Amino acid sequence: MAPMRPMTVNWVGLWTIIRREWSRVMRVPIQAFLAPWISALLFIFIFGYVVGGRITSIGGHRYIEFVLPGVLMLNVVNAAFLQSTSQIYFQRFLRYIEETLVSPLSYVEMIVGSLAMTIVRSMVTALGILIIGAAFGATSLSNIPEFLFWVFGVAVIFGLLGIIVGLWANNFEQLTMLNVFFITPLSMVGGVFNTVEMLPGWLKWIAWGNPFFYFVNGLRHSMIGYSDGAHVVLIGAAVTLSLMTVMGLIVWRLFAVGYGLRE
Amino acid sequence: MTTPAISISHLRKVYRGGTVAVDDLDMTIAPGDFFGFLGPNGAGKSTTIHCITGIAKPTSGKIEVFGIDAVKDYREARRLIGLSPQEFNVDTFATVTQIVEWMAGYFGLHAAQRKARTQMLIERFDLTAHAKKQFRELSGGLKRRVILARALVHDPKLLILDEPTAGVDVELRLDLWRYLQELNREGKTILLTSHYLEEIERLTRTIAIIAGGRIVREGPKSDFLKGHGLETAYLTATGATPEHLAAAGAA
């Protein structure tokens, strides 16, 4: 074997994490890709087409066009969170996380490698839903770079959140608790199906304090140009970037101290 | 003065809940040595190994691998180590080839090197017929071979083997012994833990006995073989009962 040079970025190691995780996801392609597409199809058909067909317009757009971004965001959030939690938790459960712990991978490389597949899965999910939406004549992309920002940003945030939960959980029930009690309820009241103006006055403050509202609003703005307020998109971008940074630092720190990883 | 392969100073490891698994352990392994690490269950052998390799975080103390701090410069230190752990820490749905090849990737081997090393080790450990099988489909002995192949794929300078022949048949054990001796003759430093005293006696040149988280005896193998032999030396060092010593023929 050739003599060793000092380590810089372990690109091969990083690529191996991604390849390996792709291999794991492709063991369950129906669960990973088909399930969110079917879920989105049902949401779009029932809420967008059947119910939406009886609503004249909302925010100046057909209801099906209005609701598609919210449905897309719901599924991106779920895809990112599920991918991350399952990746970390099963590595811990079967103990093969130790393979990365004994190898010369830096914490940043481990985190980036984990997130890479999360982003891929989220993007593939989003692409599939755009195609489904197109079949209903509901898909439009008024700003593609902005669209990519929101999908990427939300995938990273929920990917990082998934890593935190995956490190914390000690059983399968704990793994799903955050999704059941926090993510799903907040995402449902985050403007997926309605504008803020449609909410009763006493509920509006919940929307403004709900990060999902900003994600959905931002994605909706990138697709159909509609926003629930003049500066909401910019506030949402700031919230997204802040959450990405703060959660990235938290996850890096958890890896550095070995929380949930090292004995 | 030659840099030791492993130098451990005042290692202490306390688990959550207060269990002191390793308590002020000092140990040095010379480069190129074949070092036997003995001790009863729960003595701290695996914990010491986990602290060296990064699976566990030391509470205090210093560990150096060929002069490199295993905590501060963990990436450089880990490049030098290959670990065959006691328990199977594997993605059980992955194939034999994937398990070995992915580990090669983690250690930065490029595609051609990964393929060559993986192929060589699969052949060397007689795994060719099982290369495409999932780990969970293999027998215990075959699983053990895969773990060893994985530990060697990046050609480490230091090989740490935690009970590598547990559950393995006689033929494989003898074959592994020959292979390990060959690797040691080529210059690899080997740290071996085992409950098979015959294995320690046959393979190692230096022995350390750990009990209660501390080294209780250490020295050349020849010192342990004097008198009533390794078994008695071990039982005496670990505070065995008179009945155990009598059974060993030492009382």
Image (spheres, coloured by chain):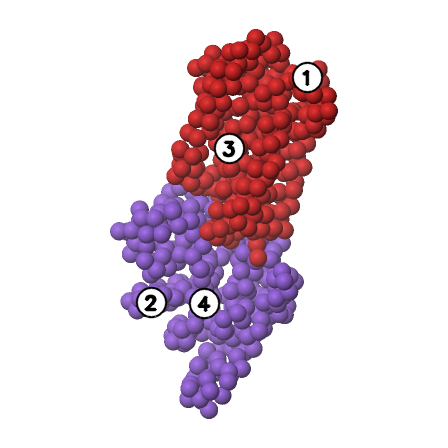
- Looking at the rendered structure, the secondary structure element under dot 4 is strand
Label 2, label 3: how far apart the Cα atoms are: 46 Å
For the image, the number of numbered tags is 4
Q: Which one is earlier in the sequence, the residue at label 4 or at label 2?
A: 2
Q: Amino acid at mark 3?
A: Ala
Q: Quadrant of the N terminus of chain B?
A: bottom right
Say few, some or many: other residues with alpha carbon within 10 Å of mark 4 (under 14 / 14 to 19 / 20 or more).
many
Q: Which numbered circle lies on residue A79?
A: 3
Chain B appears in which tint? purple
Say few, some or many: other residues with alpha carbon within 10 Å of mark 2 (under 14 / 14 to 19 / 20 or more).
some
Label 1, label 4: how far apart the Cα atoms are: 70 Å
- Looking at the rendered structure, the secondary structure element under dot 3 is helix
Task: Specify whether A235 is left or right of B103.
Answer: right
Label 4, label 3: how far apart the Cα atoms are: 44 Å
Q: Is residue B223 above or below residue B176?
A: below
Mark 4 or 3: the one toward you:
3
Q: Amino acid at mark 1?
A: Glu
Task: Name the residue carrying label 4.
Answer: B192
Mark 1 or 3: the one toward you:
1
| Label 2 and label 3 in one chain | no
Residue shown at 38% from the left, 42% from the top: B112
Residue shown at 50% from the left, 73% from the top: B39
Task: Name the residue carrying label 1.
Answer: A197
Task: Name the residue carrying label 2.
Answer: B173
- Looking at the rendered structure, the secondary structure element under dot 1 is helix
Label 1, label 2: how far apart the Cα atoms are: 74 Å
Label 1, label 3: how far apart the Cα atoms are: 29 Å
Answer yes or no: do the residues labelled 2 and 3 have beta carbons within 8 Å? no
Chain label for disc 4: B
Q: Amino acid at mark 2?
A: Arg
Chain label for disc 2: B
B232, B151: nearer the viewer: B232
